[in-house]
Structures are given as structure tokens and as C-alpha cells.
């Protein structure tokens, strides 16, 4: 079964928020930090860990 990456991330994120209940500011910081790192010089390093 092929599941799109965005759907898998959405499901994992939803379950993580429901089960762990992190503060909303932490979620915002992680999302913003990930967005900023993806567009920086560190992107190839992060890409190496993901693949």
C-alpha cells in the first residue's frame, strides 16, 4: 500500500499531539525551525540523515 508522505506525516503529527499533548508554542517552534532549516545551508546535512 502506497501512502503519500504528507498523509503519513499528518497522521503521525495528529496522534503525537493527541497522545503526548505538547504545548502549542513547542509545536510552532518545531514547524518554523524545520521550515527555516529546509531553506538554509544545513539542508544537505539534514537530507543525509533523512535518506
Image: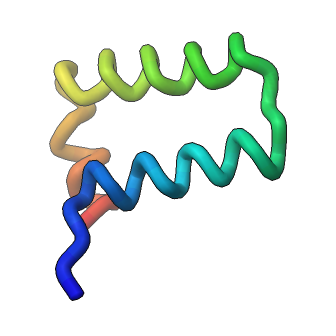
Quadrant housing the C terminus: bottom left
- Label total for image: 0
Residue in the image at 21% along x and 20% along y = 40
Give residue 8's position: percent from left, percent from top.
37, 60
- For the residue pair 26 and 14, the one nearer the viewer reads as 14
Give residue 11's position: percent from left, percent from top.
49, 55
Give residue 22's position: percent from left, percent from top.
79, 31
Give residue 9's position: percent from left, percent from top.
40, 52
Instruction: Look at the image and name its color scheme.
Output: rainbow
- For the residue pair 16 and 43, the one nearer the viewer reads as 16
Residue in the image at 68% along x and 49% along y = 16
| Residue 34 placement, left or right of 3 | right
| Residue 23 placement, left or right of 29 | right
| Residue 35 placement, left or right of 47 | right
Q: Residue furthest bottom?
A: 1
- For the residue pair 49 and 12, the one nearer the viewer reads as 12
Residue in the image at 65% along x and 53% along y = 15
Quadrant housing the N terminus: bottom left
Residue in the image at 43% along x and 47% along y = 10
Q: Quadrant of residue 44?
A: top left
Above or below 13: residue 40: above
Amino acid at each position: 500500500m502506497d501512502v503519500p508522505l504528507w498523509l503519513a506525516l499528518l497522521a503521525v503529527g495528529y496522534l503525537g499531539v493527541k497522545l503526548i499533548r505538547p504545548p502549542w508554542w513547542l509545536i510552532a517552534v518545531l514547524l518554523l525551525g524545520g521550515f527555516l532549516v529546509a531553506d538554509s545551508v544545513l539542508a544537505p546535512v539534514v537530507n543525509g540523515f533523512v535518506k
